[in-house]
Image (cartoon, rainbow, N blue to C red):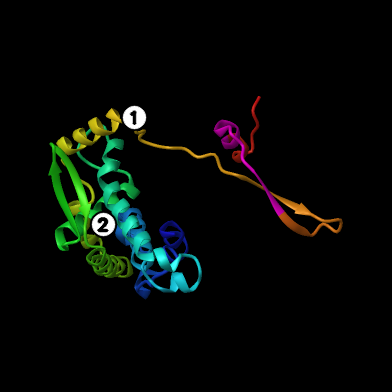
Amino acid sequence: MTTNMHEVIGHASGKLAERLGGSAQPDLKEQYSALEEARADLVGLYFLPNPKLVELGVLPGNAHEDIVRAEYEGYTRNALLQLRRVREGSQIEQDHMRNRQMIVHWLMANTDAIERRTRDGKTFYVMHDWRAFHDGVGALLAEVQRIKSEGDYDAAKDLFETHGIHFDPALRDEVVSRVESVGLPSYSGFVQPRLEPVVDASGAITDVSISYPQDLTAQMLEYSGKRMP
């Protein structure tokens, strides 16, 4: 659900100052993409607890709070787990990863929603107050939207230099050791279902058939317009 809101009402929302001429990218320079991904993530995270989602029937009312809590816990945990993808150095380069770390680390620095705990020599990020998480997300979203709307490069750079780019290599090494001990891959790929229209004698679509191809390579070639030899 947060991914849907990220794409539909996240990237599609917000206004820019008229002086920016319709795009903040020239002003925000290399900070633009990470900031925009953060803004869209924050929109999804902020609106997830909204009762309108239950009213629309897209989330069950009897499990709404549990869904919010699970999403916030997962988002927090991912900021730690994603370090397994950066095996060298002490900086995050990928914009989506910078975005996720920035949000979680900002919340850790500015709210009481998340605690860093150590148990048996292992580090954990514990989201223990989803309401504080939600309030913090709202405050950060307001600032991120302001930065984009005004094209405030210095504020964007400071936000990511402080919270989104740098990490402790020792923590990364710990994460890598832990994920390797349980065989957790750094990345996962998915074979998508194939949707094909079912038409009647007049050519009108009456249904959609779903099949599940089990060959990732063939599917990627199909998407590219090629076929297996």
Q: How packed is label 2: few (under 14 Cα within 10 Å), some, or many (20 or more)?
A: many
Left/right of residue 5 with respect to residue 159 in the rendered view: right
Helix, strand or loop status at disc 2: helix
Magenta stretch: includes residue 212: yes
> Which image quadrant is residue 154 in?
bottom left
Position in image of residue 126 (x %, y %): 21, 52
Disc 1 target residue: 183
Q: Residue at x 19, y 45 (%)?
A: 124
Disc nearest the viewer among 2 and 1: 1
Left/right of residue 2 with respect to residue 94 in the rendered view: right
What is the three-letter code of the residue carrying label 1? Gly
Residue 182 visible in the picture = yes
Position in image of residue 56 (x %, y %): 50, 72
Disc 2 target residue: 103
Helix, strand or loop status at disc 1: loop
Q: Is residue 70 above or below residue 150?
A: above
Q: Residue at x 30, y 42 (%)?
A: 82
In terms of sequence position, does the residue under pointer 2 or pointer 1 come before the other? 2
The residue segment tinted magenta is: 208-220
Which residue is nearer to you in this view: 136 or 19? 136
Which residue is nearer to you in this view: 183 or 66? 66
Q: Quadrant of the C terminus?
A: top right
Q: Quadrant of the N terminus?
A: bottom left
Which residue is nearer to you in this view: 134 or 139? 134
Position in image of residue 53 (x %, y %): 45, 69
Residue 158 visible in the picture = no
Q: Is residue 26 above or below residue 79?
A: below
Left/right of residue 11 with respect to residue 205 in the rendered view: left
